[in-house]
Amino acid sequence: MDKQLELLQGTLDLLILKAISLGPFHGYGILLRIQQISKERLEIQQGSLYPALYRLEDQGLIASEWGESENNRKAKFYRLTAAGKRKLQSETENWERMVDVIAGVLRTTPEEV
Amino acid sequence: MTLWHRFRSWLRGTFQRSRIEREMDAELRFHIDAYADDLVRAGVPREEAVRRARIEFGGIEKTKEECREARALSWLGQLWRDIRFGLRLLMKSPGFTATAIIALALGIGADTAMYTIVNGALSWDLGLDNRDQIVMVRSSDLRRGENWGVSYPDFRDLRAQVKSLAGLAAYQLVPVNVSDESALPERYYCVQMSANGFSVVQHKPLLGRDFIPADEQPGAPPVLMLGYHVWRDRYGQDPDILGKTVRVDEVPRAVIGVMPPGRRFPEDTDLWVPLIPDAASEKRDSRELMLFGRLRDGVGVAKARTEVAALSGRLAAQYPDTNKDITADVRPIMEITGVYFMKPLFVALFVAVGSVLLIACADVANMLLGRAADRSREISIRMAIGAGRIPILRQLLLESLVLSVAGGFLGLLVAVGGLKWFDRGMGTETKPVWLHLSLDRNALFYLAAVSIGTGILFGLVPALRLLKTDIIAAMKDGGSGITGIKFGLWVSKALVSFQAALCVILLTGAGLMIRSAMNLYAAPLGVNPVDVLTMRINLPQAKYAKPESWIAFHENLQRRLQALPGIATAGAASQLPLGSWIPFGVEFEGAPNDSAEPPEVGGLIVSNNYFDMMQVQGQRGRLFSDSDGKAGPPVVIVNQAFAKKFWPGENALGKRIRTIEDDSKGPWLTVVGIVPDILQNFRELLKHDPLIYIPFAEKPERQMFLIARTEVPPATLSDTIRRELQEMDANLAAYEVYTLEDRIASHRLTVRLFGTICTVFAGVATALAAIGLYAVMLQAVSQRTQEIGLRMALGATRRDILALVFSLGIRPLLPGLIVGLFLALAASRVLRTLLLGVSSTDPVTFVGTVVVLLLAALIGCLVPARRATQVDPMVALRYE
């Protein structure tokens, strides 16, 4: 396993939105999903997931309801609201532009300036 | 993120705190358990798995706290926190809170009540959908500057030629007796209107058809349009009313339609009939008609006015005999209504009540300033540990908003109660149609806006003053920041001065109204109104064509009424005291017959026993005897004012005068007596005008007041008298049945009402000003404790200290007092039309105002002064 990367400031929200966009999950499921799709290369403090979820819910980007987990236990499931979907899309575009810009800047050689 | 989501989350956060906590616990526990289960499945022993799951999750309590914060970040949550903080603070000082809320409730409540009345009056639309397009056309005499109606021929010509109006209609208001089989005869306001009237104002009947041109042709079958309320009240909404016959002043008329509810234009019409010109109305100088028209779309009043003036100029040239110097004028309908003329008065009252509210605001601002001194330390600490100015300002404003909104809620009760009280004060009188005495949606919006507006207004000053606090100084001396105090005191004094100025204006207004009311009620009426019942009758043309029949009717009626038990005497008069008169031109025998206009005086047509019945003692000569008007030369009685004006220093008895009406001269009348002045003037309630009294038999009138002096309470006889009338003529309606005392009270109602309103406003304002001064002085004394202690230690007596406090209290008042007196001098002119026997610059009132205000100030200073004298010098000097 490669060394895990520390999460960039502000990217956890984006990851959560992305994970939930694949289907409703409870908190633990979201964590597992992020780790799965990131191939466990991101280090996420488990406890830090929840304040982020509460914040997103407070902003109306995600909504929650209680349901049954895979092993028949009561769990709180999160899903994306319409506002959350729009936010995910715009944030994804922002992120890609940002990556392009930063990468371009970093690739710059002295001759090009 | 929608507002709704935030709101929902805030609601949940606020009201379901414990559930949220439980859910949070359950959610986090699920996470840890699920992870532990996964670890167990991967081969880790259970105990070790649980331990690792807990460690890797991190601090559970820390996570929970962060979750809570994530929620509380929403601004609504913070708002709620601030409001609760404000509420807690206000609960801690209930005395301050109660005083402030009551002051605001009085101010806001009175303001809302007045807004309801003024808004109702000014937005009244006369039952028109297009009131801004409707104009009235009247003719006026350029030479004499008098206004009249328009004659039928002039109306016909104007209607045919005018271009700027989409329609022009004529009407005439005639009270009528209505009788048929469905109920007792009743008196209604009937409008004779040209057939195009409804289409000019674009009204359509609810049932039946509109008038058509055929209806206004001479000889057309008589028809009738009913007002909705007549259809409802008299005919029980009879669906088969169309085609039924109703006798209107004895003429049978077929009902052709019913107007919708609220449609009573023009004036307060009950019934409409077509206006049919006859020989009399075809005369061009018989200017009896009122004209209304609708402006064409896009045409202004000014243009219509120019056109109509030009048209009437052409008529004047064409018919110089009748129309010389006669012009016609166009005015918006709203300017003709009574409400329009009362506008300045409404504005004055609205300003007055607004002043009361401002005084209340100044009070609360001053009290908050007083508290600010105590709170500057708290605010300093909060700012020192990093609180921003905006959140602090927001929180301070929220505190004052909590106060003003509470005041607003209580003010709602004050407004409703005030309107109820006003309603009762109006008595049983029929209220003007524009008078709305219930709070509508507009009034509630107004109340909400005023509550929030005042909260910001009086909250901003103390809040800004607190933000100016010098943190270091405040923290260091443990008291208050020096700059803040100075600023606060300066503002406090300005507010007190401002309150004083407003109070002076209100007090002078109230004083003038009180003086007027005192003059009014002290003035002798000239008659004894106790135990007198009055009602009106009008003998219709169709049945009572000749004046002889009127005389016979009244003689018969008088005989029958006086035979009834409980009635001492019965008679009649054309007008009652305070009820105006019939204008007559008079000519004096032997006076040089110059070309000047004959002087106009008031005349009353009375039954021969009128003066006995009214218990008036003759001054000179004799009163009317039974034979006057029947045998011997015609006679007249004049009042003192008449004798004084026209025959100063001469003996009036035996002199002869005659009346001139429309150029027709009556017979010479010999003056046989002079009676003391009786108040008759309807507008200037204290004025004695020259009057003549003519026996009914000499100059009979169709429309008279029946008068009965009773031996029992007069109101108990009204049905007896009506029954007696019914037996004489089953179609005759008796209307406006009131005791004379009630009538006189209703004539004086305006003065009493405005007097009471002004007095209440001024009283509340003065009380509020005293409370404000009290709050300021209490603060001033507590800040000067040290100084007072020092003075006492140096030998100042109790009296010196009292003088110090009172002079401190009065001094800021003085500039306001002086400015207020000047403003009041200007403002009281608005009241001039209501003043009776007192000038708008009445010195007694102005001196009284100053005395009342200074007394209120002394009362406000009393408690602070007492507190100052109780300062213990030793304690005070050690203080701080």
Image (tube, coloured by chain):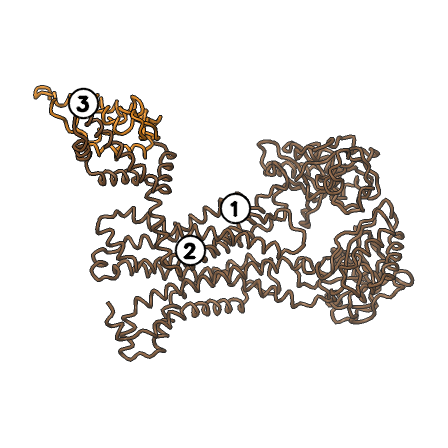
Query: Callout 2: 10 Å neighbours few (<14), some, many (20+)?
Result: many
Q: Colour of chain B?
A: brown
Q: Nearer the viewer, residue B198 or B291?
A: B198
Give the residue type that dot 3 points to: Val
Q: Could you tell me residue B355's position as x and y percent? A: 47, 56
Query: Callout 3: 10 Å neighbours few (<14), some, many (20+)?
Result: few
Q: Could you tell me residue B337's position as x and y percent? A: 63, 46
Task: Work out how far the residue at label 2 is from the one at label 3, CA to CA, in angstroms.
Answer: 58 Å
Q: Could you tell me residue B242's position as x and y percent? A: 77, 33
- Quarter the C terminus of chain B occupies: bottom left
SS at mark 2 in the image? helix
The total of numbered circles placed on residues is 3
Whether residue B729 can be seen here: yes
Query: Callout 1: 10 Å neighbours few (<14), some, many (20+)?
Result: many
Residue picked out by circle 1: B443
Q: Nearer the viewer, residue B662 or B724?
A: B724
Task: Work out how far the residue at label 1 is from the one at label 3, CA to CA, in angstroms.
Answer: 59 Å
Task: Work out how far the residue at label 2 is from the one at label 1, CA to CA, in angstroms.
Answer: 20 Å
Residue found farthest to the left: A110
Task: Give residue B832's quadrant in the image.
Answer: bottom right
Residue picked out by circle 3: A101
Name the residue: 58% across, 66% down: B515
Q: Is residue A62 above or below residue B695?
A: above
Q: Colour of chain A?
A: orange
Give the residue type that dot 1 points to: Ala
- Describe residue B584's horizontal placement relative to residue B476 as left or right: right
Residue picked out by circle 2: B361
Give the residue type that dot 2 points to: Cys
SS at mark 3 in the image? helix
Q: Are marks 2 and 3 on the same chain?
A: no
